Image (cartoon, helix red, strand yellow):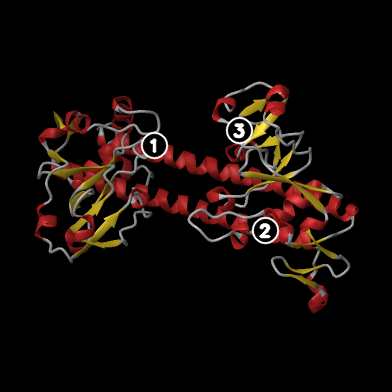
Amino acid sequence: MSRLRLRHVIRVNPPCPRFDQLGPTDDLTFLPMEAVWADSRLDTSRVRIKATVATGYTRFQDGDVLVPKITPTFEAGRSVPISGLLGGVGAGTTELHVLRPTESVDQSFLAYITQSHPFLKFGEAEMYGVAGQKRVPDDFVRDFVVDLPPVEEQRRIVDFLDAETAHMAELREGYERLRSLMTERWQVLTRRLVTGFDESHGDSGMAVSWLGRINPRWPITTIGRVSRTYMGTTFPHAYQGETTGETPFIKVGDFGLADSRGWLSTAGNWVTRRVAKTLRARVVPEGSVLYARVGAAMLLNQRRLTTRESIVDDNVRGIKFSGGDPRYWRYLLTLLDLGQLSNPGPVPSVSESQVAAVPVPLPPEEEQLRIAHRLDEFNDEHSHLNQNLSNQVALLKERRQALITAAVTGQLDVTTARGSGLQ
């Protein structure tokens, strides 16, 4: 085993002669950052012609290893060995380092080195730039020290790690499928309960376009007839850093602070009465349903409930229903796809009048209470199972990196490991 710097067995960001040999209209594989993954999520389906990526893009070819250089993608260990490119050539985001191995190092073994704990941790320490835009310098890659076994041993290690990581990927995909099925189950149960529709009603159920059939005993109204909408307030940047005050100032980014039942009792910023009065901020009552009215956050269809009087950002709207259980209305509105209502344009948005015109069922208050209680119980169960799945996925990720690190640093004898039931 030889201890050396990677610069002696690889070339970092080398020229790409195969790219130069293509004609201007020849097709090649294109890889934006979202397509670069270290597992089956690697997406090489995108195609561009050479002329459109001749400048301003990273060039690579079959046999290279791609290493994301920017945070947080680098720390996620999304380095990948590349093969099977269209014409053997590709271009992609400039946020990639290209590592081209010599005959002294196996391509896949090199990729596993760049996914190991020491490489990622030392690389993170060497990053430069401002927060959110830090990058790993190419000199770090060149100077990274490795203990390199003979190529034959590298390939034995690669065979072992390929089998182990493939098994872990199957487990992760199984967890993700289960998570998806759980979400579908949650949506089906929520829709069934908030509409009160029993299949035994057959065609006698009353139809609401976005919900389907509802309990024929319930009247149908519109959101605007049974609620009041509260507008948001535009806050100058100077006021958005206050962390103390009497009233929470809720932005779309605060939606993630809600509990599993959607109640939002805190915020990143707070507003004093003096500031609220100065800016003539509109107060959203306790028990209002909040939604994002613009952009990507709107398409997530997240709905939150206020636990106290609040002030909301202009990108947020609050709906206070005149009667019934606010929990029922939140669960009902989680099913409303605002993307279907949004105005066309580069940034999707929805108006208050569009939301107000949406037809909704109006069950008796005692029915709303019963439905909300049942969905709270189910939501707690769903959140608990979802957290367990997330923990399993995190443990798999940790085990994968630990196994890769042990194998490529010589701490694990893969021949012994094969016989120990690790596979």
User: What residue appears at the point 73 percent right and 42 percent down from the top-left corner?
Assistant: 305
Tell me which numbered mark, 2 or 1, is placed earlier along the sequence: 1
Dot 1: element = loop
Q: Mark 2 points at which residue?
A: 336
Provide residue 23's location: percent of width, then percent of height: 12, 64
- Residue located at (83% from left, 48% from top): 325
Q: Is 376 left, or right, of 242 in this rendering?
A: right
Q: What's the residue type where badge 1 is placed?
A: Pro
Q: How far apart are marks 1 and 3 (CA)?
A: 30 Å
- Residue 157 appearing in the image: no
Q: Nearer the viewer, residue 132 or 417?
A: 132
Marks 2 and 3, how far apart in space?
Answer: 28 Å
Residue 171 on image: x %, y % = 46, 51
Residue shown at 24% from the left, 31% from the top: 137
Q: Which amino acid does label 2 sit on?
A: Leu
Mark 1 or 3, closer to the camera: 3
Q: Mark 3 points at which residue?
A: 235
The local secondary structure at tag 2 comes to: loop
